[in-house]
Image: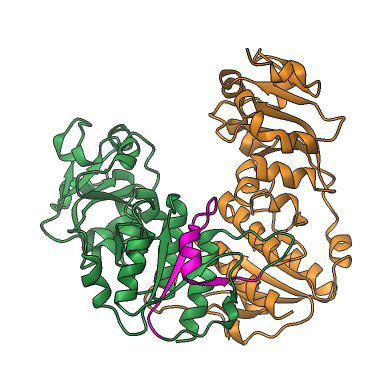
Chain colours: A orange, B green
Amino acid sequence: MHPDPVSEASRLTRIDDPADERLAAYRDIRERDLVGREGRFVAEGKVVLNVLFGSSAFEAESVLILESRLDGTTDIIERVPPHVPIYVAGKSVLDAVAGYHVHRGVLAIGRRGEPPDLDRFLGGLSARAVLPILIGISNHDNVGAVFRNAAAFEAEGVLLDETSCDPLYRKSIRVSVGAALKVPFVRSGDAGSILTALARHGFECLALSPRGRIASTALDCRGRTAILLGSEGHGLPETVLETLRSVRIDMSAGFDSLNVAAASAIMLHQLWRRR
Amino acid sequence: MHPDPVSEASRLTRIDDPADERLAAYRDIRERDLVGREGRFVAEGKVVLNVLFGSSAFEAESVLILESRLDGTTDIIERVPPHVPIYVAGKSVLDAVAGYHVHRGVLAIGRRGEPPDLDRFLGGLSARAVLPILIGISNHDNVGAVFRNAAAFEAEGVLLDETSCDPLYRKSIRVSVGAALKVPFVRSGDAGSILTALARHGFECLALSPRGRIASTALDCRGRTAILLGSEGHGLPETVLETLRSVRIDMSAGFDSLNVAAASAIMLHQLWRRR
């Protein structure tokens, strides 16, 4: 007979009742994704949890592991701070609580900090900081993908207007492979108020647009640089395009359509390798 | 009283019975997505349908429009070839047939042609052709996104091994914004047989890998060029990496993780602008 891994390891608490109050934060994850969770977020999968436990900006409240995945998560369990409870549940309990099939088998509830003040945040960046600025990007995959590119190419942060979606939505964090927990961000205001703050802090602001006046390959900006990215449907507001230098990524005249995440990858890679 | 748009326009056939046999190809779209559809595919949304009706490689069998979207689809209706029936249904009928909420409101069934022969396909490409080669890419979003980048940066085709997923899966076509119907592709064999065929046709084959020996920015290939892209989990097979020149995209040492679609955007953009 195998020894019971749960009772052997005192760090782990087995829960067999889907109604157990200790799992309240994991309840109906999918339905509650879009309505906010009172200062909390859901992190999913080993890669994301590893970023969470390496983060100084976010703390975990608890971890929930599918019993059959215990063997494969010993490295995660070792990284969980001592005061954070680790719950273990069987598949039927986990799926019943979460309200969907949790195929990654490991979840954590994280706690958001206070939203940072935009001016204080911008003031603390380096003289060569690069920031993608998302205006009206409401697709969680795209926001997650931009954060992943921002981390890969060392953007010092991401700004989002208030109509862009929350980077700490479960799916955004997952698509970002944890970068949404690593790259600092501020989400507030509209394009106008963000541009005003960026100007106050000496940023050159560039608007990425298919009809931009400067080719991305001709760019040579070495100081603080912000790249504004708009949604696929609407692009950036005309009032923004009129006031800023606009940049284009040259592409085929026959299919001039690039996803915002792909565009951010090309732009951030280019700015990164010039530094 | 408004005139009835359906009875007025003789091109349109209204269907009120979800069991109507003329809608058989639209039945249970989501469940049948993954099991193939006997030489057919499902195209979804106006952008994709516009590419379909501009394609010489694919033909539409029928079109199905949500009645409430008729006003917004007159431009689509005008492009439907005269022999292709256009069905119109109310929301409840459409959702009952398709088995999910068709929020784009316009669908078409397309017919696949015969799969092209790899040698004939490669032989017909230009002396400066660029091809992304997908090995083990089983995520439909990633395949769709690579096709979109391939179209934007004028790759002459895409090759996929047989473990990569079907570019004509509904979601791949949608994510590609129709590029999967525009950029020719061949999906067959394994990495070994694909590399042999590419060599026969004078392609320089490069393997993209985080540990690649050459930086992407140092590349200077002006002849026929193929870029092999592997899956995030497994990367390219060791046997492939050993035999090919390997290329890396330089990025942060602290977060060296780029999605395959983002990597393809950076590589294809770079190869495109050198030509």
Residue A69 to residue A19: above or below = below
Task: Name the residue: 53% across, 52% down.
Answer: B234
Above or below: residue A63 compared with residue A263: above
- Is the residue A57 above or below the residue A125 in the image? above
The quarter holding residue A187 reads bottom right
The answer to whether residue A21 is seen in the rendering is: no
Spot occupied by residue B136 in the image (x, y as percentages of width and height):
43, 53
Q: Is residue A146 visible?
A: yes
Residue, far left: B83
**Toward the viewer: A188 or A183?**
A183
Instruction: Say which quadrant the C terminus of chain B sits in.
Output: bottom left
Q: Nearer the viewer, residue B123 or A220?
A: B123
Answer left or right for A91 relative to B68.
right
Q: Position of residue B142 (x, y in %)?
A: 47, 55
Residue A164: percent from left, percent from top? 64, 54
Q: Is A174 rendered above or below residue A90?
A: below
Instruction: Using the rendered view, name the quadrant where residue A17 is placed.
Output: top right
Give how far across and how far down residue A137 sits, in percent: 60, 57
* Region of the chain picked out in magenta, as a range: B223-250
Residue B238 sits inside the magenta stretch: yes
Residue sitting nearer the eye, B265 or B118: B118
State the image quarter where residue A22 is shown.
top right
Count numbered badges in the picture.
Answer: 0
Q: Residue placed at 50% from the left, 55% from the top?
A: B231
Quick check: B270 left or right of A201?
left
Q: Residue at point 75% right, 15% down?
A: A7
In which quadrant of the rendered image does the N terminus of chain B lie? top left
